Amino acid sequence: MRILLVNPPHGFSAHNPFRKAGLKLPPLGLLYVAASLRAGLPGAVVEVLDAPALGLTAGDIGREAAAFRPNLAGFTFYTGNLSNSKAAARAVKAAVPGVFIAAGGPHATLRPDTCLDTADAAIAGEGELPFLELARALQAGASLDQVPSLARLDGKTLKRSAPAAPPNLDQLPPPARDLVDLRLYKPSPAGYLRRPVTTMVTSRGCPFNCAFCSKISGTAHRAQSPAVTLAEIRSLVSVYGIREISFQDDVFTLDRARVMALCALLKEAALDLTWSCMTRADLVDAELLAAMRGAGCFSIAYGVDAALPESAWAMNKGYKPGAPGPAEAVRLTKAAGLETRAYYLLGWPGEDRAFLDKTLAEVKRIDADFVFFAVPHPFPGTALMEKAAKEGLLLADEAALFDAADNTEPLVKPCGFTPGELIEYIRGAYKGYYLRPGYLACRLLSPRWLNLAARHAAAVLSFLFRDR
Ligand code: B12
Ligand code: SF4
């Protein structure tokens, strides 16, 4: 069986900070699926094409497929990238007419019905087991009825099988990183300290219910045990010479005891390793942060989203009374000797200019080392989408929503702004934050900041001052 796995080409708009920063991360989801295929289907030949990293177009992917001649091809579909994803899938089908096309990933999970004009089947949720079962059934020429998490069309009716049980992360084979060239990837400039750097995901699922969040792995949090995480890190160090890990878990510190145990193991292992992670502001404390610092952590990214309590309530952030707020979390993190990155959403329904000015004043008071601003995007299945649809705030029809390239254009009507004015406001927010004399004075004395500025001056200046 020959299986092709494709991360389709993705268009970033001019004002997407990711584009400016040249950020590219390995497609871990596809690499997990590939590893399970190789472990569970001996003899399978698996190839991965990561179009954003390799700079491939749909045409290039069709040509690669013609050479590889897959029996089965799987694609990651993101909301916002639907037509690019379908173009890539169609190119493969045109090149190899008998191939079975499966869509997976976030959009196939949330709206499988919208994938099936191009894909023969869509797989919802975590794909390791369902895709393996699909490959086995196709290889055996068996019915697909027993394949879990599958959506197909029966005439015009959507037919769905029961979802697969979520995998035990300790039992999954680690991502098949040998199928991509790890040297092609690096996080955004502020997201790493040393190279070679790569990503890991050590937990899945989140019990919170933020109103904008597009959750793929359910509400039950599951994590690798610390020993399994350490074994994967050791192998990254010995096989690829990795010196830094960027953990991509949604909420790395959700299970405090696990992180404390992992930190103890990392400290004892004394690998020459630095790392960073993402979490929520209410899930850190001084003791935990000190342990993380002692184990090589250098930076934490906080999904703050809402700087003010009114926004946190509107976005359903679910903060427990008495938990540290963003300002306290950033203060504690800096006091532990760690860098802080904070992500904010600007332009939630009802947030007018006066409210956003107040928000930005709070963002400055929180004073993270790096900030990132985004507009809220109405993903299918989210409370934001429901609210925007109900209140007539959607600025695009469904087809346009699913084809919004990188979700940086406002698609929910801003309050008192045109969409263009909101983008300009955000550009001004970056300038207002980074060009503060107090901010610059502190950072210009730091070797890390000078190094960043020197390496990325062109990208930073063009992002702050130029093109739309
Ligand atoms: C790391 C990350 C990135 C990285 C790298 C993405 C990559 N190449 O994998 C970067 C920073 C580049 C990125 C960019 C963006 N991201 Co992003 N990202 C994430 C994050 C935090 C982790 C992804 C991850 O590695 N997960 C762990 C792996 C194991 O899971 P997975 O990727 O989902 O894959 C599993 C399943 O989805 C499925 N699967 C995936 N592909 C396939 C294919 C087949 C055939 C099958 C069967 C199954 C399958 O099986 C996999 C294994 O279980 C997620 C949040 C999350 N928790 O998933 C957001 C997330 C995926 N990103 C999101 C978004 C919106 C974006 C951007 C559009 C942001 C922007 N404004 O620019 C861009 C563009 C995405 C793109 N096409 O490159 C959304 C997607 C929402 C949606 N409905 O599409 C998410 C879900 C965040 C959120 N909660 O809203 N992202
Ligand atoms: S934004 Fe983060 S904390 Fe909120 S539901 Fe999504 S993954 Fe969980």
Image: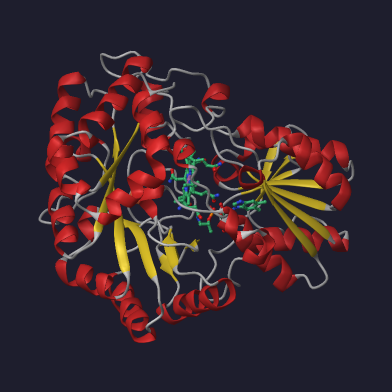
Q: Image point 32% across, 71% down: which residue?
A: 296
The spot of residue 113 in percent (x, y) is 64, 36
Quarter assignment of residue 370: top left
The answer to whether residue 197 is left or right of residue 429 is right
* Number of numbered labels in the structure image: 0
Q: Image point 42% across, 20% down: which residue?
A: 394
The spot of residue 164 in percent (x, y) is 60, 61
Q: In the image shown, does 352 or 191 lie closer to the viewer?
A: 191
Quadrant position of the C terminus in the picture: top left
Q: In the image shown, does 334 or 309 lie closer to the viewer?
A: 334
The answer to whether residue 246 is left or right of residue 345 is right
Q: Image point 34% across, 86% down: which residue?
A: 268
Quadrant position of the N terminus in the picture: bottom right
In the rendered view, would you say 419 is above or below 383? above
The answer to whether residue 194 is left or right of residue 210 is right
In the rendered view, would you say 458 is above or below 247? above
**Residue 154 visible (yes or no):** no
Q: Image point 44% across, 41% down: which residue?
A: 21
Q: In the image shown, does 20 or 78 lie closer to the viewer?
A: 20
